[in-house]
Amino acid sequence: MNILFGEAISEDIEQIQVVRTSVKENKLSDPTAVTNEDVEEFIHERCKGWVCEFDGTVVGFSIVDLRENNVWDLFLDPGCEKRGIGQKLQKLMIDWYFSQTETTLWLGTEPGTRAESFYQTSGW
């Protein structure tokens, strides 16, 4: 199993979008609402992002917004859940965020979802 974690780069955006639209919960009501340009701005200007690749394909990503002090996104391909990938992406994101600022970090997610349970289990 060849799993790699690294900083998100422009070349990852198309695969990030595939992951973002493949999720079963917290789906965008309009999949075109988050454009490639939006992702580009978030990973290079507003904040920072990380990806997890499995055999060269992005299967998860996290993005934290340093301007608005929030978790912008953390999503996994549904077939890659329960492998610790989300926890690792979250740790990379949070460790970097708090190396930059002491400002409280916030996030929003739908109540009653697996995402809410994930964040609560993580101490959020």
Image (cartoon, rainbow, N blue to C red):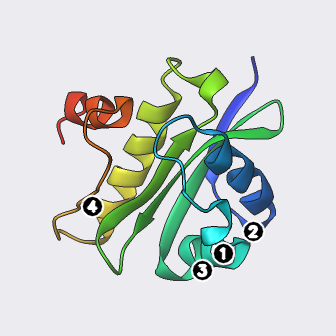
Secondary structure of residue under mark 1 = helix
Q: Is residue 91 left or right of residue 59?
A: left
> Residue at 53% across / 18% down in the picture?
83
Q: Amino acid at mark 3?
A: Glu
Asked whether disc 1 touches disc 2, contact meaning CB atoms under 8 Å apart, the reply is: yes
Asked whether disc 3 touches disc 4, contact meaning CB atoms under 8 Å apart, the reply is: no
Q: Earlier in the sequence, mark 3 or mark 4?
A: 3
Asked whether disc 3 touches disc 1, contact meaning CB atoms under 8 Å apart, the reply is: yes
Q: Earlier in the sequence, mark 1 or mark 2?
A: 2
In three-dimensional space, the C-alpha distance between marks 3 and 4, rounded to whole angstroms, equals 21 Å
Q: Nearer the viewer, mark 3 or mark 4?
A: 3
Tag 4 residue: 98
Above/below status of 91 relative to 49: above
Q: Amino acid at mark 2?
A: Ser
Secondary structure of residue under mark 2 = helix
Residue 40 numbered tag: 1
In three-dimensional space, the C-alpha distance between marks 1 and 4, rounded to whole angstroms, equals 22 Å
